[in-house]
Image (spheres, rainbow, N blue to C red):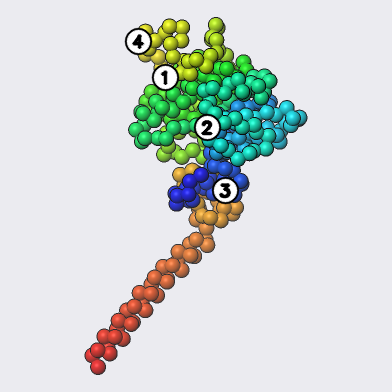
Amino acid sequence: MGKTSKDQRDIYYRMAKEQGWRARSAFKLLQIDDEFRILENVTKVVDLCAAPGSWSQVLSKRLLENANDPSEVKIVAVDLQPMSPINGVVQIRGDITDVAKKITEVFGALADLVVCDGAPDVTGLHSLDEYMQSQLVLAALNITTNILKIGGSFVAKIFRARNICLLYAQLKVFFKEVYCAKPKSSRLSSCEAFVVCRGYSPPDGFEPTLERPLFSDYRGASSDTLRGVNRVIVPFVVCGDLSGFDSDGHYSLNLPNAPPGTVKSELVLFLLFLNMFHLSSLLTYLLTYLDNWMARLH
């Protein structure tokens, strides 16, 4: 997590520090799960682009707490960067496009759920950022088709922009249900959202492979053969307590007793004291100036 003054003021940043999460993004997965129950009856999960590990922490905590037999819970975290160990999580260091065999070796079966919170460094050009993020999601989807069981779920970060419907259409090919989720902890000023895909059901005759990480040249089809307008609209769902903390809001440091959107009386008193201090300093300066002026007259 960053250490800028904006982050330090952010309510979810401070709550993550207090509760032991490695990043504020943990609340995004928690709120998605509260809304969609994606972790119910799940024992095998893959976390792609896992570092620094906040989503793996959530998976470990919720799955191990709710499992009838904790030994059945298997979580695999994949990332190019090293990560500090997490209880119940097997870490694989490598590119997400070439670790499918290693993942299935750990599970001994297909996964129930695949999640991906990865994103490239943003440029500020929304269309370009959306395109690069979509390519990452497609790469994650490709590995998902190799490791996810029929009926399983897939959750990934997206950047919403004008052409996001194309990605929705691609996801609808493989899943019965596709939703666009905006967790309450995701800043409203950000184009970030998450696709929640349920009911994995690949097309008849589809053969998963890692040789086409972006589904290029599938069965000889190319983009210039596509004609007409194909618009896919998926439900947009806000996740989290709508009366709870706002990720774009500012709150006092005394969290437990501070209702959302209010300023604690201690802060008000401090500001009043600060104003009084400035006023007293000004009066002292004026009196000193008058004394010096009177002394010069005499």
Q: How far apart are marks 2 and 3 (CA)?
A: 24 Å
Residue 80 tag number: 2
State the residue lying farthest toward the right.
69
Whether residue 196 is visible, yes or no, is: no
Q: Distance between the residues labelled 2 and 4?
A: 35 Å
The residue drawn where x is 48% and y is 65% is 270
Q: Distance between the residues labelled 2 and 1?
A: 28 Å
Residue 17 tag number: 3
Q: Distance between the residues labelled 4 and 3?
A: 50 Å
Q: How far apart are marks 4 and 1 (CA)?
A: 15 Å
Between 292 and 92, which is closer to the camera in this rendering? Answer: 92
**Mark toward the start of the polypeptide (4 vs 3):** 3
Q: Where is residue 110 in the image (x, y as percent from the top left)?
A: 64, 19
Q: Mark 1 points at which residue?
A: 166
Q: Are marks 1 and 3 in contact (CB under 8 Å)?
A: no
**Closer to the observer: label 4 or label 1?**
4
Q: Name the residue under label 4.
A: 224
At label 1, which amino acid type do we have?
Leu
**Closer to the observer: label 1 or label 3?**
3
Q: Where is residue 34 in the image (x, y as percent from the top left)?
A: 60, 33
